[in-house]
Image: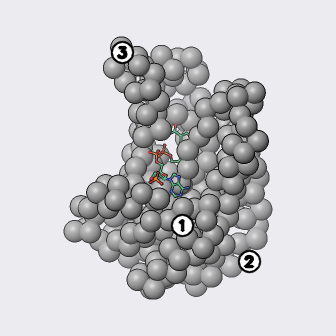
């Protein structure tokens, strides 16, 4: 099936690792042209070095919580690619703490990252997206937004706010024919979990360690997802063929969600 992404200009935040990087690779295979950012430009350039042989790639160091930095990245993308057809708001991390363990400053930072990390990008890209004939935004969010966990209390609250905001954005941006959808993740084997594995000091290998967590969390498929398994739904939501889907939130968590 042709996803009609050839030549489409897609901007992805947090593209040096994990889901953002896997999505960039899949989109490049589909013939999309890319604008990619992360804070550490050196790591971003190293991770995406091979993509330039496949498609046009604009790279920038950008902190999504900094509006000036986001505006500059979006301006560069529009100038170098001639416009933007799709945006993936993916940059981020989670704060593995209970409420008692979290300071007020950390709570503010977490809300800043989740809310402004998406809002800054969508606001900056809206004029360019509105000039596209298939403008689409995908917000990478988490099942945690609907199913909180005590050990991720603040991240869960911030993600719930982002999910709610995504519905409002879908309503607002429909006026410009821009679709806005969310992908809700469970547990995915990426940089975040590899870092936690190394910090755990476990004598197991990653597969055994993560299988135990999968059992503990009740993931129906019994394992973490892979970045490639998330890149596919993100990519299909960007496809112009998905033209009637907006304001939706797709669960991609291997069956970890307990709600119906
Ligand atoms: N993996 C999971 O189990 C899981 C579960 C639920 C939700 N998620 C969410 O999925 C998204 C992708 O995560 P991942 O698992 O692929 O993580 P990852 O492998 O750690 O990648 C995170 C990416 O985001 C970038 N980033 C972080 N903070 C940023 C900022 N303020 N501005 C710009 N870039 C920033 C990182 O690069 P720099 O550090 O260089 O900036 C990196 O490129 C995140 O929003 C994460 O919270 C992941």
Earlier residue among tags 1 and 2: 1
Colouring of the image: one colour
Query: Mark 1–mark 2 contact, CB under 8 Å?
Result: no
What distance separates the C-alpha of mark 1 from that of mark 2? 17 Å
Q: Where in the figure is residue 132, as x and y percent of width and height?
A: 55, 81
What distance separates the C-alpha of mark 3 from that of mark 1? 38 Å
Looking at the rendered image, the quarter that the N terminus falls into is bottom left
- Mark 3 close to ligand 1, CB under 8 Å: no
* Residue 83, above or below 70: below
- Mark 2 close to ligand 1, CB under 8 Å: no
Q: Which residue is mark 1?
A: 87
* Residue 48, above or below 212: below
Q: Where in the figure is residue 119, as x and y percent of width and height?
A: 67, 64
Q: Which residue is mark 2?
A: 175
Tally of numbered tags: 3
Earlier residue among tags 2 and 3: 2
């Amino acid at each position: 099936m042709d996803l009609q992404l050839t030549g489409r200009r897609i901007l992805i935040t947090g593209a040096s690792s994990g889901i953002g990087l896997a999505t960039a690779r899949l989109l490049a295979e589909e013939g999309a042209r890319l604008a990619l950012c992360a804070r550490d430009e050196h790591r971003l350039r190293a991770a995406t070095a091979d993509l330039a042989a496949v498609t046009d790639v604009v790279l920038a160091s950008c902190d999504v919580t900094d509006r000036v930095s986001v505006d500059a990245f979006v301006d560069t993308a529009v100038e170098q690619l001639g416009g933007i057809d799709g945006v993936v708001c993916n940059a981020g991390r989670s704060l593995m703490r209970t409420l008692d363990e979290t300071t007020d400053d950390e709570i503010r930072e977490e809300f800043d990252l989740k809310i402004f990390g998406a809002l800054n990008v969508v606001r900056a890209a809206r004029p360019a997206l509105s000039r596209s004939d298939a403008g689409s935004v995908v917000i990478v969010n988490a099942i945690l937004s609907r199913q909180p966990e005590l050990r991720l209390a603040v991240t869960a609250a911030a993600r719930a706010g982002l999910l709610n905001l995504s519905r409002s954005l879908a309503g607002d941006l429909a006026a410009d024919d821009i679709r806005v959808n969310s992908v809700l993740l469970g547990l995915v084997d990426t940089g975040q979990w590899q870092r936690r594995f190394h910090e755990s000091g476990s004598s197991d290998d990653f597969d055994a360690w993560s299988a135990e967590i999968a059992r503990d969390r009740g993931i129906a498929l019994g394992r973490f997802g892979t970045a490639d398994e998330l890149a596919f739904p993100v990519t299909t939501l960007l496809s112009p063929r998905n033209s009637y889907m907006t304001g939706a939130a797709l669960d991609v968590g291997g069956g970890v969600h307990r709600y119906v």
